[in-house]
Image (cartoon, rainbow, N blue to C red):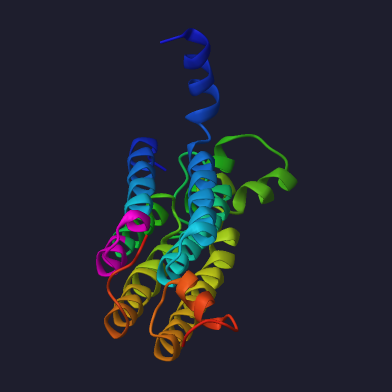
Amino acid sequence: MDPIIATFIEENIVPNFNYWIYVILMMIGLYAMITKNNLIKKLIGMAIFQTAIILFYVSVGVKDAANIPIISHHGSEHHQMTDLSSETDSTKEIHNTIDKDKYANPLPHVLMLTAIVVGVSTLGLALAISQKIYKSFGTLEEDEILNKLRPGGHD
Amino acid sequence: MIWQFDIIILIFLVIAAIISLRLKDLLGASMVFGIYSFLICLLWAEMGAVDVAFTEAAVGAGVSTVIMIATVFSTKRRSKD
C-alpha cells in the first residue's frame, strides 16, 4: 500500500474509527429520511440517525483501558498506594478519592439513556400516525399520498 | 474498550443499516433493524456503557422492533423502494 495512505489510516482512521462510523451512519439515516418513498423506510432512517448521535455521545465518554462506571470497593487499594509514597497531606486526600481514569465517564451515558427512551416514543407515535395514514389513504408510499392530496387527484 | 471487537461490530453495524434500508420487504427490513439494534446494544456494552446497553436491548431492540412489525402487519408488507 502507498505509505502516505498507510500513515493516514494509522493516524486518523484507526484511533477515531467510532467517529468515522458515526458520520457514516448519520449520513445513511439522513439519506433514507430524504430520499426513501415509503414512510416506514423513512422511520427506519430516523432511528438510524438517532442511534448515530447516541454513538457519538457514548464515544466521547470512552477512555483507554477504563472499566465500567461501577465502584465495587471504595478506596482500600488507594490507601496502600499513598502510604508507600512520601507525600503531603493535601495530595494524600486527592489520592484517597476515586481514580477517575479507571472508569468510563458516566455523564454522557446518563444523558443518552433519556435520548433512547425519547427516540422509542417518537418512533411509536410516528408508526401510529402511519397506521392512521394507511387507514385513510390506503397506501404508505409518499408519492401516492401526495397524488391523492392534490385537488385534481382521485381519492 | 477492546478495539478489535469495536471495529468488527461497527462494520457489521453499517452493513445492517444498509441492508435494512435496501430490502423491499418491510417485514425483513424490520427484522434487520432489530439485528442493528442488538449490534448497537453489544457496542454499548463493549464501550463500558452498560446502563445504555440494557436499555437499548429492552426498549430499543425489543419494543421498537415489535411495534414496527405490528405496523407492518396492519398495513402493507411490500414497499416500492
Q: Which of these two is toward me, A42 or A134?
A: A134
Say whether residue B25 is magenta: yes
Whether residue A32 sits left or right of residue B81 in the image: it is right
Residue at (45% x, 64% y) in the render = A37
**Residue A118 x %, y %:** 54, 76
Q: Which quadrant would the N terminus of chain B be assigned to in this image?
A: top left
**Residue A47 x %, y %:** 47, 65
Q: Which quadrant would the C terminus of chain B be assigned to in this image?
A: bottom left
Q: Dominant secondary structure of the magenta stretch?
A: helix
Q: Which of these two is toward me, A57 or A122?
A: A122
**Residue A9 x %, y %:** 49, 22
**Residue A4 x %, y %:** 53, 11
Q: Which of these two is toward me, A82 or A14?
A: A14
Q: Which of these two is toward me, A115 or A97?
A: A115
Say whether residue A37 is magenta: no
Whether residue A63 sits left or right of residue B67 in the image: it is right
Q: Is residue B28 visible?
A: yes
| Total numbered labels placed on residues in the image | 0
Whether residue B57 sits left or right of residue A101 in the image: it is left
Residue at (35% x, 80% y) in the render = B67
- Magenta region, residue range: B20-32
Q: Is residue A74 visible?
A: no
Above or below residue A95? Residue B66 is below
Above or below residue B2? Residue A39 is below
Above or below residue A103? Residue B69 is below
